[in-house]
Image (tube, rainbow, N blue to C red):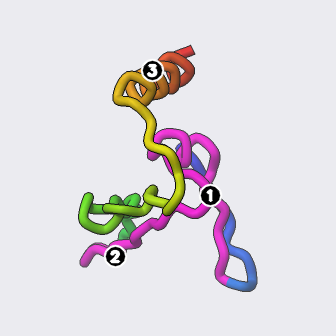
Amino acid sequence: MAFATLTSKGQVTIPKEVRTSLQLHAGDKIEFVVTEGREALLRPVTKKVDDVFGRLHKPGRKPITIEKIDAGIRQKMQDSFR
């Protein structure tokens, strides 16, 4: 079980084990849901494809091949499981 302390400014640091488990990173958005039983649920906010469509486009940037994209994804997956 992970614990955190509320500061005088109302801030809480999310424990590392929780951040890792939820795959949270700096800048990610989270949602707090308070239940009728006075419990708080913390959920990562995920984006829909429509929200991020076109974000990587930059005029003048040369496109890369599907093979390079696949190789980059493959490398990231291998790094994640080491």
Q: Please state which amino acid type lies under the numbered disc 1.
A: Ala
**11 in relation to 42, above or below:** below
Residue 16 picture quarter: top right
Magenta span has 34? yes
Neighbour class for label 2 at 10 Å: few (<14), some, many (≥20)? few
Across and down, in percent, residue 21 comes to 47, 40
Residue at 58% across, 63% down: 27
Across and down, in percent, residue 66 comes to 34, 29
Report which residue position mark 3 lands on: 71
From the viewer's perspective, is 13 left or right of 43? right
**73 in relation to 81, above or below:** below
Report which residue position mark 1 lands on: 26
Neighbour class for label 3 at 10 Å: few (<14), some, many (≥20)? few
Residue at 50% across, 16% down: 78
Neighbour class for label 1 at 10 Å: few (<14), some, many (≥20)? few
* Between 10 and 78, the one nearer to me in the picture: 78
Report which residue position mark 2 lands on: 34
Q: Please state which amino acid type lies under the numbered disc 3.
A: Ala
Q: Earlier in the sequence, mark 1 or mark 3?
A: 1
Q: Earlier in the sequence, mark 1 or mark 2?
A: 1
From the viewer's perspective, is 24 left or right of 32? right
In the picture, the disc for residue 67 is none
* Between 50 and 58, the one nearer to me in the picture: 58
The residue range painted magenta reads: 10-38
Across and down, in percent, residue 54 comes to 36, 62
